[in-house]
Image (cartoon, rainbow, N blue to C red):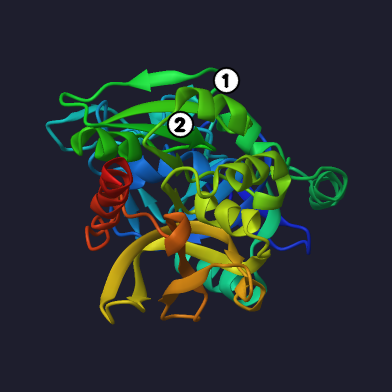
């Protein structure tokens, strides 16, 4: 170990990876995952879906364009840590107001740089996502391993990041009213709906169906969010009660929850899908979309049979389910992120599809 390393990552197996600290210097027990995006570290840092996770960035140079006040995906980031190869603390960008390290320190987000992130990514890919301890370099290994044995990664991620009260987001021209069930919703989802003339009422993840029916929206949106969809059965139950009453559109965790509401099952992937370059085939059009993704869980293909859902999209890297629909119920969902913050714009058509569904329902 080089003498000037001051931070390290410890696995339950006893594997240690050393580096240099930036951001917050606190110890954290987290799930380690990797992201293959080449840009968009601010949106990744502020995506609520990374709650309790340490994200390894495969792109080698992070921090070079700083942090812009306009580009956060949530007001208070809840990511656990960011692990990078090279950290740039002197950003050059006219929209930058703070450095990445300063923001991480403010929100108690640990950082380690000087790591061979591609070797670390291969380790995660080969062995799967794992529980790790981010700590000081001089923490004894035996102590670190004991901490990992005794402490679990919390499972209350959605309740932590979901809003506590209803909130209204007005649009310039309001043609539709959408209730968005917030399981850890990214800001660009609301912006995307507002741009398409939707007034959005965001509600907490555990809002009962009866309250949503009181609002009487034109459509219901189910957001992305962190963790295991089976940890929030109350949200799946709300969706189940709303099926057939309103057009419903779900993204990421929302896709998994809609599938659970129909009786399908979910499972945890070995290392998940995270990045802006995942190829997805639209089975209805035959077109290939390059998509932005961030999830640990997927919907089991076999369990979809006899639920009323049909598979509409598949991941071309591993053939996992990427989209489902129930046309008669006016319900559809995708596992990836068509709002694309960060990421490619191939899949934005899904938002206008939701608008069309609401328009057809109003005119029926």
- Measured as percent of width and height from the top left, residue 64 is found at 25, 44
Q: Could you tell whether 40 is left or right of 210 in the image?
A: left
Residue 104: which numbered mark, if any?
A: 2
Quadrant in which residue 73 is drawn: top left
**Residue appearing at x 69%, y 39% in the figure:** 234
- Measured as percent of width and height from the top left, residue 322 is found at 46, 68
Q: Secondary structure at mark 2?
A: helix
Of badges 2 and 1, the one in the foreground is 1
What residue did someone put label 1 on?
A: 164
Residue 70: which numbered mark, if any?
A: none
- Measured as percent of width and height from the top left, residue 265 is found at 68, 65
State whether residue 108 is above or below residue 301. above
State whether residue 120 is above or below residue 78. below
- Give the total of numbered labels: 2
Quadrant in which residue 162 is drawn: top right
Structural crowding at the residue carrying mark 1, measured as other residues with C-alpha within 10 Å and reported as few (<14), some (14–19) or many (≥20): some
Between the C-alphas of marks 2 and 1, the distance is: 24 Å
Pick whichever of labels 2 and 1 is earlier in the sequence.
2
**Residue appearing at x 43%, y 42% in the figure:** 221
**Residue appearing at x 23%, y 57% in the figure:** 349
Q: Secondary structure at mark 1?
A: loop
**Residue appearing at x 16%, y 26% in the figure:** 173
- Measured as percent of width and height from the top left, residue 260 is found at 64, 57
Q: Could you tell whether 49 is left or right of 70 in the image?
A: right
Q: Is residue 110 visible in the rendered structure shown here?
A: yes
Structural crowding at the residue carrying mark 2, measured as other residues with C-alpha within 10 Å and reported as few (<14), some (14–19) or many (≥20): many
Give the quadrant of the N terminus.
Answer: bottom right
């Amino acid at each position: 170990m080089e003498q000037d390393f001051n931070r390290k990552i410890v696995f339950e197996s006893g594997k240690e990876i050393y580096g240099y600290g930036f951001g917050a210097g606190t110890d954290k027990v987290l799930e380690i995952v990797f992201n293959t995006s080449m840009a968009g570290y601010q949106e990744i840092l502020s995506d609520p879906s990374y709650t309790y996770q340490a994200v390894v960035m495969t792109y080698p140079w992070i921090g070079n364009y700083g942090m812009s006040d306009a580009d956060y995906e949530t007001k208070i980031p809840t990511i656990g840590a960011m692990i990078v190869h090279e950290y740039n603390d002197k950003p050059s960008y006219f929209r930058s107001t703070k450095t990445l390290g300063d923001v991480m320190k403010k929100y108690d987000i640990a950082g380690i740089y000087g790591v061979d992130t591609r070797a670390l990514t291969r380790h995660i890919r080969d062995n799967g996502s794992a529980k790790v301890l981010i700590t000081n370099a001089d923490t004894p290994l035996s102590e670190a391993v004991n901490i990992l044995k005794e402490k679990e990664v919390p499972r209350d991620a959605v309740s932590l990041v979901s809003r506590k009260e209803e909130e209204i987001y007005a649009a310039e021209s309001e043609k539709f009213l959408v209730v968005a069930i917030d399981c850890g919703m990214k800001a660009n989802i609301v912006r995307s709906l507002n741009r398409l003339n939707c007034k959005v009422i965001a509600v907490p993840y555990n809002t009962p169906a009866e309250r949503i029916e009181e609002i009487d929206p034109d459509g219901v949106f189910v957001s992305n969010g962190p963790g295991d969809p089976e940890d929030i059965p109350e949200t799946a139950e709300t969706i189940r009660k709303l099926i057939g009453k309103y057009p419903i559109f779900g993204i990421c965790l929302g896709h998994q929850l809609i599938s659970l509401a129909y009786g399908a099952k979910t499972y945890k992937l070995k290392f998940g899908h995270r990045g802006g370059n995942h190829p997805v085939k639209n089975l209805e059009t035959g077109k290939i979309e390059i998509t932005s993704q961030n999830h640990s869980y997927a919907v089991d293909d076999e369990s979809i049979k006899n639920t009323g859902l049909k598979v509409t999209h598949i991941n071309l890297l591993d053939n996992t389910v990427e989209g489902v629909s129930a046309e008669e119920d006016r319900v559809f969902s995708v596992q990836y992120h068509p709002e694309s913050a960060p990421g490619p714009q191939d899949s934005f058509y899904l938002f206008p599809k939701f608008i069309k569904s609401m328009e057809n329902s109003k005119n029926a």
